Amino acid sequence: MSAEANNNLSARLDGLLAQVARGEIMEAMHEYYDDDVVMEEPLYGRTDGLAANLEREQRFLDSVRRFTRFDVRHRVAGAAVTFYEVEMGWESTDGTHVQLQQVAVASWRDGRIIHERYYYDRGD
């Protein structure tokens, strides 16, 4: 991958993280995720396709009263792959406060995420 393409992927990652930090999660998914994206995470397993991932994400968002933290600790953009580490927190609609450290690894094609996997401790 050329340095220019690598810089473009870095800019795309920055844009994605900025939107998520502003709470524009659904908008970010429409902007940065491919229609055929596969997302995997410990709590939900594998979800195929943007439509199914939007539904899953909306269910999660419906359980959140407010986000309290989204701090990106590290981020790397490489040859069609990005990594970032984030510390995040939220208050659930039932009043539970959740703190999570998470790493996300994403594969990109044509400026959109085609596969993303999250790594975090579920706490069980």
Image: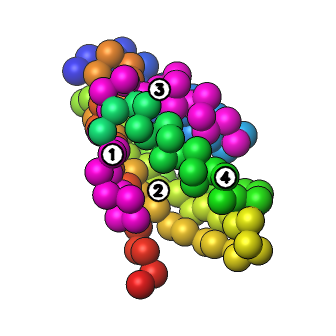
Quadrant that contains the N terminus? top left
Task: Describe residue 25's horizontal placement relative to residue 37 as left or right.
Answer: right
Q: Is residue 33 magenta?
A: yes
Local SS, label 2: strand
> Label 4: few (<14), some or many (≥20) within 10 Å?
few
Q: Residue at x 41, y 84 (%)?
A: 124
**In the image, residue 77 lies in the stretch drawn in magenta:** no
Find numbered disc 1 in the image and state the secondary structure of the residue it sits on: strand
Determine whether 46 is above or below 123 in the image: above
Vertical side of 33 occupied by 72: above or below: below
Q: In terms of sequence position, does the residue under pointer 4 or pointer 1 come before the other? A: 1
Which residue is more in the foreground, 117 or 79?
117
Read off the magenta span: 23-47
Q: Indicate which disc residue 85 carries.
A: 2
- Return the x and y of residue 74 as percentages of the image width and height: 48, 53
The answer to whether one can see residue 104 in this image is yes
Q: Residues within 10 Å of mark 3 (few under 14, many from 20)?
A: some
Residue 35 in percent (x, y) is at 37, 23
Residue matched to label 3: 32
Give the mark nearer the N terminus: 4 vs 2: 4
Q: Identity of the amino acid at label 3? A: Tyr
**Residue 3 in view (yes/no):** no
Disc 3/disc 2 C-alpha distance (Å): 18 Å
